[in-house]
């Protein structure tokens, strides 16, 4: 017989610029019901909340109604855990400060927590994923950008302002050669180790060498990190070199990050991790070669095992248990 | 009338390679009594503890005996907060693992906590110094080496192994030009921003330029950071350039560290801070020029106001209140 848990489910909301995906999740990380709305369709945030509640209703009915819900977690860009608001998110339809937690709490009558995508991913790994049982680890998300969620003593680090854990904007090249970043500065980790950073590396090597490559058959400006992966799969040396450089840069940066909080593990998540050993082998080698002697051989370098399409909703939902 | 506090004092022990200094401290950070023994005189750690207790006795009598002591804190090299031990400290007479907390608890009958010097300094600033009331700050100690103590949510970060907060060994120059470090690697922050790092910078500039300088009158290998300070005080341009470079490197590194935990402040402590604005002005400028846009103008860059000779004992004692 199963133990009956009071309020055995949480709601996770993965709020993207285009779509908003909701999931109702149990303690094992199984998504019992899922629904979605268009984020862009509601220029007034109050209408967005109303539409969300309507869309959620059938899913809630499936699990026995809102009385079965412990809480709700929202993963969203520029979300501030402390205030429960989204603040000046460039990629969302709403301007200024949006009191997400407050309005959803009013509408649903359950506690609501918000945080950014990378922190939500860290919560997801700690609650349902490869970081279960870990108290100190660093989540690195490798998507269009590079995000991070830092867990110390079992808690996500939010810092003095709610926006801690921006390791994608750690500057790894302070020389004039550092790549221009969307943040207005140069040399940020994310200009090298995001999916777009990998595409930049491809174009850079294509331009500066005459090495033959399958990637030369594509229009340079349209090449993606996935193209590089496909070429690597066919043994393309230039593509392999691209992942080698990327892994080295990321492994070296993580070795340096270790001096901060000596995490038990780094957990990597996102599109780029599909490159598997092409990325992870040079990453591990660079990490071990560069990490401070006392920390050698001690840190796990893991790839998230959460299903990619579900991970964002699971991560957000993990906040609902708090 | 004063409120009577039960057990109103703590013992602080600053355990150095040569001397061990003890202080009995009240909640305001006033050292009520002080004593010291030679660390090197006791090759057996049990004799060291015995000698410590004997030396402490008159100081304890002054405040009403051990019954007035809440606890004891020890700041020592390679001290592990989690285990209460010193582990393989190169600069101490004892080899291997020394159970410091356990043996002092046995001898004194009060709770004992140990940590390394930089973490103790952070505790001292938070308890009695410029970081009072702060929950998120980073302590940077600028001595023979560079140490750090990271405070998040009001607690020192010890990480997965008790040795977190080694920002002196963050590699800021991964190129072959990075300076050799005592840790066996190259380019560590401490090779540039410690007192010895500053002396290296002096020698480097002296060798690579013909600029006249008061520092040319000294034997190159004997020049210290204090000589550079004295020269700077006389308006020596080369010496000013040395502090300018040092401040820029440190400010740039701190700007990057901000992406980790968005501290409310960095607190600098140690001999080098005597250089005052020669160091702090370029440091502040580099910090503001390099920090991520959202964090600009938000972080305090402070110099410890604790009396240098008392700070180590005060820092250690702060652990005794926990």
Image: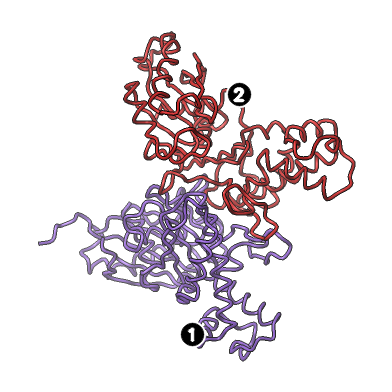
Chain colours: A purple, B red
Judging from the image, what secondary structure is the residue with disc 2 in? loop
Residue A263 locus on image (x, y percent): 44, 53
A240 vs B123, nearest the viewer: A240
Q: Is residue A182 above or below residue A239?
A: above
Chain holding disc 1 = A
- Residue beneath label 1, please? A233
Q: Are marks 1 and 2 in contact (CB under 8 Å)?
A: no
Taking the spot 85% from the left edge, 40% from the top edge, the residue there is B237
Image quarter of residue A29: bottom left
Say yes or no: labels 1 and 2 on the same chain. Answer: no
Q: CA distance from mark 1 to mark 2?
A: 62 Å
Q: Is residue A141 above or below residue B282?
A: below
Mark 1 is surrounded, within 10 Å at the Cα level, by few (under 14), some (14 to 19) or many (20 or more) other residues, namely: few
- Residue beneath label 2, please? B307
Q: Residue furthest bottom?
A: A217
Instruction: Judge whether residue B139 can be spotted in this image.
Output: yes
Horizontal placement of B238 versus A295: left or right?
Answer: right
Residue B36 locus on image (x, y percent): 51, 19
Instruction: Judge whether residue A185 can be spotted in this image.
Output: no
Judging from the image, what secondary structure is the residue with disc 1 in? helix
B137 vs B75, nearest the viewer: B75
Mark 2 is surrounded, within 10 Å at the Cα level, by few (under 14), some (14 to 19) or many (20 or more) other residues, namely: few
Q: Residue furthest left?
A: A1
Taking the spot 61% from the left edge, 83% from the top edge, the residue there is A222
Taking the spot 53% from the left edge, 46% from the top edge, the residue there is B166
B321 vs A108, nearest the viewer: B321
Residue B193 locus on image (x, y percent): 67, 43
Residue A300 locus on image (x, y percent): 41, 60
Chain holding disc 2 = B
Which numbered marker is on residue A302? none
Quarter of the image containing the N terminus of chain A? bottom left
């Amino acid at each position: 017989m199963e133990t009956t848990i009071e309020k055995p489910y949480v709601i996770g909301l993965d709020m993207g610029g285009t779509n908003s995906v909701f999931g109702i999740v149990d303690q094992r990380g199984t998504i019992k019901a899922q629904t979605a709305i268009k984020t862009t369709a509601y220029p007034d945030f109050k209408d967005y909340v109303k539409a969300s509640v309507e869309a959620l209703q059938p899913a809630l009915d499936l699990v026995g109604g809102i009385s079965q819900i412990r809480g709700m977690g929202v993963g969203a860009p520029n979300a501030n855990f402390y205030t429960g608001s989204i603040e000046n998110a460039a990629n969302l339809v709403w301007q200024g400060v949006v009191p997400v937690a407050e309005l959803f709490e009013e509408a649903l009558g359950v506690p609501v927590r918000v945080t950014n995508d990378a922190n939500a991913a860290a919560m997801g790994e700690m609650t349902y994923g490869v970081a279960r049982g870990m108290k100190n680890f660093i989540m690195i998300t490798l998507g269009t950008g590079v995000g991070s969620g830092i867990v110390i003593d079992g808690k996500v680090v939010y810092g003095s302002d709610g926006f801690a854990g921006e390791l994608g904007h750690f500057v790894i090249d302070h020389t004039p050669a550092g790549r221009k970043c969307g943040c207005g500065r140069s040399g940020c980790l994310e200009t090298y180790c995001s999916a777009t950073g990998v595409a930049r590396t491809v174009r850079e090597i294509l331009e500066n060498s005459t090495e033959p490559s399958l990637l030369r058959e594509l229009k340079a400006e349209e090449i993606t990190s996935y193209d590089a992966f496909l070429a690597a799969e066919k043994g393309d040396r230039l593509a392999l070199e691209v992942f080698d450089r990327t892994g080295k840069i990321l492994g070296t940066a993580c070795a340096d990050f270790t001096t901060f909080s000596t995490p038990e593990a780094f957990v990597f998540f996102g599109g780029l991790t599909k490159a598997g050993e092409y990325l992870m082998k040079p990453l591990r080698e660079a990490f071990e070669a560069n990490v401070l002697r006392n920390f050698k051989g001690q840190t796990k370098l893991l790839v998230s095992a959460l299903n990619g399409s579900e991970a964002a909703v699971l991560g957000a939902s993990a906040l609902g248990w708090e």
